[in-house]
Amino acid sequence: MKKGDKIVGIILLVVVIITLGASSIYKTLSKGTEKIAVIKRSGTVIRTIDLGKVVEPEEFTIKTDNGHYNTIEVKHNSISIISADCPHKECVKSGWISQPGEMLVCLPYKLIINIQGKKDKGIDGGTF
Amino acid sequence: MRSSRKTWYILLLLIFSTFLVSCTSNAKPVEKETYLMGTVIQFKVYGKNAEKATEEAVKRVSQIEKKMSVNIETSEVSKLNAKAGVSGEKLSADTYSVIEKSIKYSNLTGGALDATIEPIVKLWGIGTDKERVPSKTEINEKLKLVDYKNIILDKKNSTIKLGRTNQAIDLGAIAKGYTADEVKKVLLKNKISSAIINLGGNVYALGNKPDGTNWNIGVQNPLSTRGEYLGTISVSDKSIVTSGNYERFFIKDGIRYHHIFDPKNGYPAEKGLISTTIVSDKSIDGDALSTSTYILGLDKGLKLIESIKGVEAIFITSDKKIYVTEGLKGSFDLTNKEFTYEKGR
Amino acid sequence: MKKTKKMVLLSMLVAMALVIYLIEGQIPVLFPGIKLGLANSISLVALILLGWKEAFLIMILRTILGSIFGGSMSAFMFSIAGGVLSNIVMILLYKYFKNSLSISTISVCGAVFHNVGQLLVAAFIINDLRIYVYLPVLLIAAIVTGYFIGILASILKSRLEKILPQI
């Protein structure tokens, strides 16, 4: 161990501690502004994605128990069902959602995707 | 020095405890979303007992579905249908009362609402992978089985019988409304005074928002994707139910066939309306009326609503005109300019 | 060393760096495109044995070739930013502090700045502060991989030192 090593080691340790602290504070402060996409099948959560942390668009496919599928794409702060083998493809036609309160639904496959958080549109519920 | 230290500690404790209190206050609702009755149901419940109330509410919805769903073989309705033309089925108070109410609405709407529509529903199969356009002969054949007057009630024994073989009941036009009312009862029993119940678009807004203001409920734009609203209604303690040609349908050769069948001819109702929204105190009324008025059409529909106290409506025609009944005009805010008002009739 | 021999040696090192780069691309990471930066170990060895120009060159070539073999535009940007920052830091530290810092420390610093560079590019792409929440975990990962790279580089250095004068 050379003498400079200790100094660098201490500097690094301090930096890590500071960034950990700053990061936790930021997380608590920004609670509610995150865009967390929640994917549910028949009411059970099967995946959550922090859309704010998505840098590169990503695609993945979710399959049902009897071989059907929905293909989902996530981009920074938005999510969409880009393809599926359900009969009417209403879920695909719904396009992209990016705001809390918005929802993507594939009824035949009991798939629900929505973004957690307070709706800022001022609408508390909607008919369909 | 010691006493001032003590004061500091007490002060800190006080500040800390006020933090705790405000953090656990009623401001955060219990939001639950699940899949029942063939659709997405959502609850947003405020209050101390919100967690328990919501759990009970979900159980109640599931219970009602098990009794009334025509897609569940062991449901009371399915059993009743299986015995059509042979014998009656003893029913629980829930199912009996819903069928009874549907008959009342059948009488009120001149048969526009008819619970015995199931043979037609099954024939078209909309929403299943067997959906198709049946031939006129097939439709007329099944149409013979559609007549609510063949529903024989035996109140003393809580039994109902269908008069003719192969007749069948489908409570789809009225069940969600009934369920919403039942959920409201569960919430009230748990001392909840502020909540939104949304059963696949059948909304009940209980009380006010925690801050005392009205709930804002969006009215679905029938020509756009789910979640796109053309306006909002500001309400408190009201049911808002919409029937539209966009909820369940298929398109063949450029023609849209939707799921709201006219019991008079066995075809999807085409009277110029693409969506009907009913605002009422009881959701079962809203559900029944939104379906019936869709089938009756604009003129008869408006006439019917205006003859019932405490019920208001928004009708949207295929040429993007909106008709709003008197009592709702102050609380409906149209936000999509593609649609134009037509004041009154 | 004669020119051709140097070129051959450099190409070999680039090839090694490229292989490491492609293999480490298979390791699952926080978000697609970022890398652990293990390939920088080759640049570090080159820095010590040949000089800073060679080290830098190897990094550039490795990144460009690596992107031709697969990888998105953003993966390329992550690698360039991470590589450049990491190499500059290692070059400077080696030049001015090689007597007071061990190779492991230099490579840890290089790894740290490699990840900082990648994070900066990500922040630039999505223009969202939230991405910085990854900073602590990336720093810790860098310290670990940096140490590992340092050991790798040491081994490579001692092996190559013996072979090179004989060529």
Image (tube, rainbow, N blue to C red):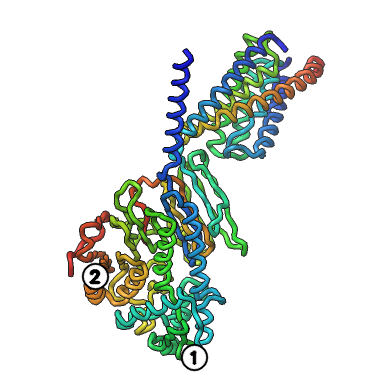
In the rendering, at what x and y percent does residue B146 appear? Answer: 41, 86
The amino acid beneath tag 1 is Gly
Q: CA distance from mark 1 to mark 2?
A: 38 Å
The amino acid beneath tag 2 is Lys
| Relative height, residue B326 to residue B27 (above, below) | below
Return the chain for callout 1.
B
Residue identified by numbered label 2 = B309
Residues at marks 1 and 2 on the same chain = yes
Q: Nearer the viewer, mark 1 or mark 2?
A: 2
- Asked if disc 1 and disc 2 are in contact, CB closer than 8 Å, the reply is no
Using the image as rendered, state which of residue A115 and residue C16 is in the foreground.
A115
| Relative height, residue B123 to residue B194 (above, below) | below
Categorize mark 2 by other alpha carbons within 10 Å: few (<14), some (14-19), many (20+): few
Residue identified by numbered label 1 = B85
In the rendering, at what x and y percent does residue B248 appear? Answer: 42, 69
Using the image as rendered, state which of residue B293 and residue B141 is in the foreground.
B293
Where disc 1 sits, the SS reads loop
Using the image as rendered, state which of residue B313 and residue B182 is in the foreground.
B182
Is A105 positioned to the left or the right of C164 in the image? left
Using the image as rendered, state which of residue C31 and residue B41 is in the foreground.
B41
Q: Quadrant of residue C105?
A: top right
Categorize mark 1 by other alpha carbons within 10 Å: few (<14), some (14-19), many (20+): some
Q: Quadrant of residue B259?
A: bottom left
Is C7 positioned to the left or the right of B76 in the image? right
| Relative height, residue B101 to residue C45 (above, below) | below
Where disc 2 sits, the SS reads loop
| Residue at (49% x, 54% y) in the render | B52
| Relative height, residue B101 to residue A123 (above, below) | below
Earlier sequence position, callout 1 versus callout 2: 1
> The C terminus of chain B is located in which quarter?
bottom left
